């Protein structure tokens, strides 16, 4: 049975949101065929699809407009400060309530998820005073996690880390990347994950030099580098862990050096993590080290950012968003340096860390 978001947690999330939204009277979260992660943040729902549902949030109360397929789930999981309306019970009454809640108000909406046609319909049908894109404010609020969020993330991390320790026993010469991915997903589900992350990566051999490789029918050979970059989902919250293995022995001197170098880069970057430090400083430290160490043999082979935020999305806040941010207690970020030599292979090591009041904790 699903549990409701505690009333105190729900109220705190609304209070934090509206504290960042000066002059906004109501926040509108509209789901289409894709559910806006901010819907899960504000409702705390852990089941139900809630496609084509509409959430209106005020400072002290929320209204969920949904349909018969999700109505009972909404009643079961709603926080105390939420009213759930089944639009199909009385369409005319539901529209009248929407009009009362929106007409003449300054309405904040998530510009990253609200389709333009829906935006135009709301403007013409319900006549808000003004509609303001608050997607940046929503991301900012979600950047710092509360205890309920941290509990889910920590469980997801434990599941993925356990699966990473278990998976090498299933390595078998001739198996495909997709077969190993299926085994990894099965282990995570067996350990209590609700699902595995959508874009998990398993890469063998030369494919490990492609950071965003899509797993395929490539077969595992002795001496191959193996990268697994994967996450679990627990109550809508993600983990994101990467490990690099050498199959069938100790590997070549070059493979071992790549692994050791990336480990050193990650340790140095994580060591900079503390409140008040700029996120970009971690990236710059790792990039400079990887470009200059070992007489520059890995120069230019670290081709992505040092990490991102995780939470309701695997990339809860991407590197582009974090570039101008300073670290704060409660942030959960990944630290994932890597080196990639096309035609040979690559190494990536990734951990999820929590920024604490005094520094960091590797989850």
Image (cartoon, rainbow, N blue to C red):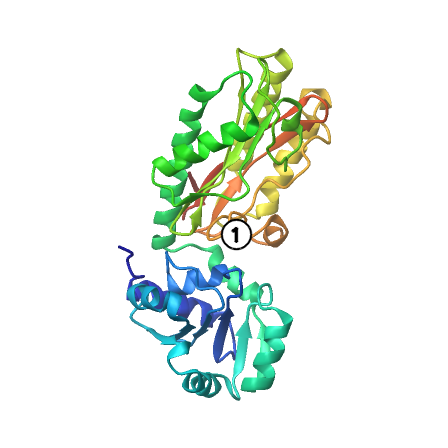
Residue 136 position, x and y percent, is 57, 64
Residue at (62%, 34%) from the top-left corner?
286
Which residue corresponds to mark 1?
A: 316
Q: Secondary structure at mark 1?
A: loop
Residue at (54%, 74%) from the top-left corner?
108
Closer to us: 112 or 306: 112
| Residue 54 in the image: above or below residue 203 | below
Residue 350 visible to an observer of this rendering: no
Left or right placement of residue 72 versus residue 252 in this view? left
| Residue 135 in the image: above or below residue 311 | below
Residue 146 position, x and y percent, is 38, 56
Residue 3 visible to an observer of this rendering: yes
Left or right placement of residue 228 versus residue 12 in this view? right
The quarter holding residue 222 reads: top right
**Residue lying furthest left:** 1
Left or right placement of residue 239 versus residue 297 in this view? left
Count of picture labels: 1
Left or right placement of residue 170 versus residue 284 in this view? left
Residue 352 position, x and y percent, is 47, 40
Closer to us: 10 or 40: 40
Q: Quadrant where the C terminus lies?
A: top left
Residue 303 position, x and y percent, is 69, 36
Closer to us: 130 or 71: 71
Q: Quadrant where the N terminus lies?
A: bottom left
Circle 1 residues within 10 Å: few <14, some 14–19, many ≥20: many
Residue at (46%, 51%) from the top-left corner?
311
């Amino acid at each position: 049975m699903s549990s409701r978001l505690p009333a105190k947690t729900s109220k705190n999330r609304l209070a934090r949101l509206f504290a960042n939204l000066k002059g906004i009277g109501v926040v509108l979260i509209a789901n289409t065929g894709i559910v806006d992660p901010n819907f899960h943040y504000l409702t705390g729902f852990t089941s139900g699809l809630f496609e084509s549902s509409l959430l209106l949030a005020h400072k002290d109360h929320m209204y969920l407009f949904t349909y018969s397929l999700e109505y009972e789930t909404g009643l079961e999981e709603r926080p105390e400060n939420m009213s759930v309306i089944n639009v199909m019970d009385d369409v005319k009454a539901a529209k009248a309530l929407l009009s009362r809640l929106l007409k003449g108000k300054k309405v904040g909406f998530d510009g990253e998820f609200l389709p333009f046609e829906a935006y135009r319909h709301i403007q013409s049908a319900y006549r808000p005073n003004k509609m303001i894109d608050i997607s940046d404010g929503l991301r900012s609020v979600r950047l710092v996690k509360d205890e309920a969020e941290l509990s889910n993330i920590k469980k997801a991390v434990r599941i993925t880390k356990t699966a990473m320790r278990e998976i090498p026993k299933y390595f078998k010469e001739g198996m495909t990347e997709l077969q190993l991915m299926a085994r990894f997903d099965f282990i995570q589900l067996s350990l209590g994950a609700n699902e595995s992350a959508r874009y998990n990566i398993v890469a063998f051999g030369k494919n490990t030099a492609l950071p965003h490789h899509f797993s395929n029918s490539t077969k595992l050979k002795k001496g191959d580098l193996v990268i697994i970059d994967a996450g679990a989902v627990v109550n809508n919250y993600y983990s994101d862990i990467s490990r690099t293995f050498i199959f069938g022995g100790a590997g070549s001197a070059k493979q071992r050096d790549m692994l050791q170098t990336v480990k050193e880069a990650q340790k140095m970057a994580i060591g900079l993590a503390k409140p008040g430090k700029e996120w970009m400083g971690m990236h710059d430290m790792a990039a400079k080290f990887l470009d200059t160490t070992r007489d520059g043999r890995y120069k230019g082979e670290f081709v992505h950012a040092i990490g991102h935020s995780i939470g309701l999305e695997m990339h809860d806040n991407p590197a582009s968003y974090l570039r101008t941010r300073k670290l704060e207690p409660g942030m959960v970020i990944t630290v994932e340096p890597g080196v990639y030599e096309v035609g040979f292979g690559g190494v990536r090591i990734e951990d999820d860390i929590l920024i604490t009041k005094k520094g960091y904790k590797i989850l």
